[in-house]
Each structure stands twice: as structure tokens, then as C-alpha cells.
Image (spheres, helix red, strand yellow):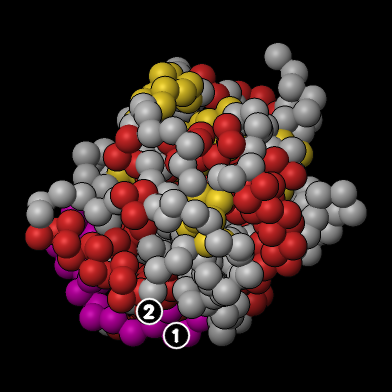
């Protein structure tokens, strides 16, 4: 099926950082639009100036850019026809639609003061009934001069039933319906009103968002009806749960700034793949969807109704998989970035060894801090007893083997760990692998646990290798 005119949007409020939840919505909306050769819009819903956080818009642009979610239109990508994409730049448009409602007798200025409203609320509370504004709806509507909130006169209090592309038939009712504010006294529209006007003006065909909007949908539907607007396709995305899939995602993970994952060394490709699988289940065993594979596989039918698990272990695993797919030069740059203070020539030789055991830059840094790579960059010192191989009587039994290894290595080609291995292997087979490789490895790395001796020798180079073997033999005498 090819919906040529699919239009989706991501519509965050600039009230903080972009986190996993929001960006997952953006990704799904993007995938659906792009899969159908449609249009994906970034719209900033900045109608609550009190909650706005400075820098949040740029942060959103940066986060989407990092992930490669390339919107067709947005605050920094204008359009002559359907922009602007900052709601605060669209106040005139909302006024026009508000006027349409006023003309139909479906909107009126709120005549009450804050104190009067409080009194109504308290009276309702005292009588144990819900406060409904519509119980106090004025019989005659004054002219709206923009200084009072404008309310929608809900035409009909009834249950609404509608279709959701993910959840099927949904229904919610009277309790959600009241004469809600559409334009505030400060001239800004409310979300309830503005998003409907914008979705219409921008031609949005599919509205993707979280389940927290289901209960308000009767309000939206009553507005669509009042404005004679056809409903878009509602696509309710499942909530994001913690790793066990049962509890909601913890505050810490849920609120984490997406770009922190970048700092921590997560690749956008891995994050993209990981996010897509939160609440979207393609079926089958495949979990890695590199490049365009994800877009090809994506469909609304496979979006889950129930919560999708956020499992950081899986993210780590995926990241390692995607790191493995990087080119050699990219892997080198990745490690250099994690350890900017270390000698680059040596570090370059250590890259495969480092990446074999880690999932991100945080782990690389932690290993470096724990001294795991120190042998590669500085002389080693250690207690000679650790040179003892388990089959040897005493540590010094290894001295003649080390002597022979030094002879072989002084003639060896140090171009790669393999060439070094080639120079030693026959001798290792002859005297016993552990008998040679254990003390050799310890003499080069100074550690009981380290990469294999061929890698160690390659990383530190021939000169240091011969010096360290010599030092080990001295320690043993
Ligand atoms: N501004 C709303 C939010 O950030 C958007 C909801 C919607 O997509 O309609 O939650």
C-alpha cells in the first residue's frame, strides 16, 4: 500500500530535553511518512510560555539531527504553504478559527473572575459533585475582545466512539467534555485547540502520540465536528516500560536527555534500531535492522497495544553490534574520542582489543581508569611471582623460554599480531603453549589478565617488547 500523501508530525512542547519517549514517537511518525513517500513535520508547541525552557527548541533540532530523523519542514525548514512551525508564530491563524466558532455560536468569552470560578469549584466540592464549567455557561455571550479566555461551547454531551489504527475501536465519554478554553487570556491557544487547527492546516493525515491523549479525544472530536474537519487517523503508541515490561520506565532512564547517549558512546544507528523495537514488533527473530531495512519492515499493524520494554542491556548489545559494523577508520575515531589524552599511534593499534570487550565509551573510559590499558602506554612493574605458569615449579623456570622468545622476536616482523604469532608459534607448540605464552604475556603487560602476548607485543612494538622480556628475565634471576 502506498499512501502518497501521508503527512505526520512530531509536536513537542519546548519544556525540557528530548528523551526516549518523545523521540520514539518522532521516529515512528518519521518512518511511517517516509515509508509512504510522505511528509514529516516538526512542529513546536510553544503555547505555554511559563513552562518553556530556554534552548529546548535547539535541543530538539539537535537530537533529531543526531538520530538522522530528517524532517521535511520545521522551525528551521520553512515552507511557504504550511508554515510557520512555531505555534507562537501562528496566533493569527488560531484567532481566525476561533472566530469561525464564535460565528457559529460555539465559542464565548469566559465572563468569570478567578475568584468566582474558585467559588463554583468549592461549591461543587462541598456537594460532592464534579465541577463542570458548562453548569455555569452564561445564557448570553458577550463580545470577545481578547482579554478574557475564550471557551468552546461543547455542542453535545455524549459518548464518542472512534477508530484507532493500533487499538481498534475506542470510546470515552461525557466526563471528558466540558466548555474548555481554546484561547487563553494571554492570546495563546491551548493545546486542545491549536493542535487541531495545525494538523488541519498542515494536512496531517496520521496523528501519532501516547495513550495519555485517549481520555481527551472526545474533546478533540467535538472540535473536529464543530469545525467540520474530517478526523485524521489516530495512532496511539504504547507506553514505554522498564526492562521487565511491567513497570513504567524509571524516572532516571525516562527523563535522560537523548544526547547523553551520544556522550556515552551510543551510535545513532543503534539508538534508531533500539527505539524502533520499543512497542513495534516485526515478529520473527530479527532484531537488527540496519539502514533502510527498518523502513521497509515498518508498519502500523505491528505496533503493539501493550507497553514496550526499554531494556538498556539490549541497547548495549545493539550498540556493540553496530560498532562492529563501523569501518576501521570510524572505529579508530570512536576510541580516540573516548580516550583523547592517550598516544594516538599506540592507541590505534589497541582499537580492536578495546572494542572486543566494551559496548560504549563509558566502559572504555572505566577500563582506562582501572588501568586496564596502562601497559600499552608506559613501563610495567609487577611482582615476579605472577610470571609463574601453573605447570612450572617456580617462576624462574620460564626464564630460558623467555630468552628464546626474545631471540625469535628480535628477527620477527612486527606488522601485525599474526606475524608475531607466526614467529613464535612453532616454539610454543614445542615447549607448551601455556609454558611460553603465560610468562611472555605477563612480562609484556605486567598483568595476570590482559590481551594475548602477540597483541601486547604488536601494540608496544619490537623495542619495548625486547626490553620488557629482558626485565622479566632479570626479575627472575
Ligand atoms: N505538544 C504535545 C506534547 O508534547 C503533543 C501531543 C500531540 O502529538 O498531539 O505532548
Q: Secondary structure at mark 1?
A: loop
Q: Residue at x 21, y 39 (%)?
A: 246
Can residue 462 be seen?
no
- The quadrant of the picture occupied by the N terminus is top right
Q: Residue at x 53, y 31 (%)?
A: 234
Residue 267 is left or right of residue 202, and the answer is left
N-term-proximal mark, 1 vs 2: 2
Q: What is the x, y in percent for residue 451?
A: 42, 60
190 vs 461: above or below: above
Between 466 and 42, the residue placed more toward the observer is 42
**Front position in the image: 460 or 432:** 460
Magenta span includes 392 = yes
* Mark number, residue 371: none
- Mainly helix, strand or loop, the magenta region? loop
Q: Find residue 336 and report its horizontal and vertical position in percent.
A: 61, 72
Find residue 444 and report its horizontal and vertical position in percent. 42, 71
For disc 2, the marked residue is 369
Let me know if residue 234 appears in the view: yes
Residue sitting at the far front: 140
Residue denoted by label 1: 379
Amino acid at each position: 500500500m502506498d499512501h502518497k500523501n501521508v503527512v505526520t508530525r512530531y509536536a513537542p512542547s519546548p519544556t525540557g530535553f528530548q528523551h526516549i519517549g518523545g523521540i520514539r514517537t518522532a521516529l515512528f511518525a518519521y518512518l511511517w511518512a517516509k515509508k509512504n513517500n510522505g511528509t514529516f513535520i516538526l512542529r513546536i508547541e510553544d503555547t505555554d510560555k511559563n513552562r518553556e525552557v530556554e534552548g529546548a527548541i535547539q535541543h530538539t533540532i539537535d537530537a533529531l539531527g543526531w538520530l538522522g530523523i530528517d524532517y521535511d519542514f520545521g522551525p528551521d525548514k520553512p515552507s511557504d504553504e504550511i508554515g510557520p512551525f512555531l505555534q507562537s508564530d501562528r496566533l493569527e491563524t488560531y484567532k481566525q478559527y476561533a472566530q469561525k466558532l464564535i460565528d457559529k455560536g460555539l465559542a464565548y468569552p469566559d465572563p468569570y473572575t478567578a475568584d468566582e470560578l474558585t467559588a463554583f469549584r468549592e461549591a461543587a466540592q462541598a456537594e460532592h459533585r464534579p465541577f463542570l464549567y458548562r453548569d455555569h455557561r452564561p445564557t448570553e455571550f458577550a463580545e470577545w475582545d481578547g482579554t478574557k479566555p475564550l471557551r468552546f461551547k461543547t455542542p453535545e454531551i455524549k459518548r464518542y466512539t472512534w477508530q484507532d489504527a493500533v487499538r481498534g475501536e475506542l470510546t470515552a465519554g461525557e466526563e471528558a467534555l466540558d466548555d474548555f478554553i481554546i484561547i487563553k487570556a494571554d492570546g495563546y491557544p491551548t493545546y486542545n485547540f491549536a493542535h487541531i487547527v495545525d494538523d488541519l492546516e498542515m494536512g496531517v493525515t496520521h496523528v501519532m502520540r501516547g495513550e495519555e491523549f485517549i481520555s481527551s479525544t472526545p474533546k478533540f472530536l467535538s472540535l473536529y465536528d464543530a469545525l467540520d474537519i474530517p478526523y485524521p487517523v489516530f495512532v496511539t503508541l504504547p507506553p514505554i516500560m522498564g526492562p521487565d515490561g511491567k513497570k513504567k520506565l524509571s524516572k532516571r532512564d525516562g527523563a535522560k536527555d537523548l544526547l547523553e547517549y551520544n556522550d556515552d558512546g551510543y551510535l545513532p544507528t543503534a539508538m534508531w534500531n533500539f527505539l524502533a523495537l520499543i512497542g513495534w514488533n516485526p515478529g520473527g527473530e530479527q532484531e537488527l535492522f540496519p539502514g533502510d531495512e527498518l523502513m521497509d519492515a515498518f508498519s502500523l499493524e505491528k505496533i503493539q497495544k501493550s507497553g514496550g520494554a526499554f531494556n538498556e542491556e539490549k541497547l548495549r548489545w545493539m550498540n556493540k553490534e553496530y560498532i562492529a559494523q563501523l569501518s576501521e577508520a570510524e572505529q579508530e575515531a570512536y576510541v580516540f574520542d573516548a580516550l583523547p589524552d592517550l598516544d594516538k599511534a599506540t592507541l590505534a593499534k589497541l582499537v580492536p582489543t578495546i572494542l572486543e570487550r566494551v559496548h560504549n565509551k563509558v566502559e572504555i573510559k572505566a577500563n582506562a581508569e582501572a588501568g586496564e590499558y596502562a601497559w600499552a602506554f608506559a613501563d610495567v612493574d609487577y611482582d615476579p611471582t605472577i610470571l609463574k605458569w601453573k605447570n612450572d615449579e617456580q617462576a624462574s623456570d620460564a626464564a630460558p623460554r623467555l630468552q628464546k622468545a626474545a631471540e625469535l622476536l628480535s628477527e620477527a616482523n612486527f606488522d601485525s599480531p599474526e606475524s608475531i604469532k607466526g614467529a613464535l608459534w612453532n616454539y610454543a607448540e614445542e615447549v607448551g603453549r601455556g609454558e611460553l605464552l603465560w610468562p611472555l604475556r605477563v612480562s609484556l603487560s605486567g598483568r595476570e589478565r590482559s590481551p594475548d602476548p602477540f597483541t601486547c607485543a604488536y601494540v608496544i612494538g619490537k623495542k619495548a617488547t625486547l626490553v620488557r622480556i629482558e626485565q622479566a628475565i632479570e626479575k627472575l634471576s
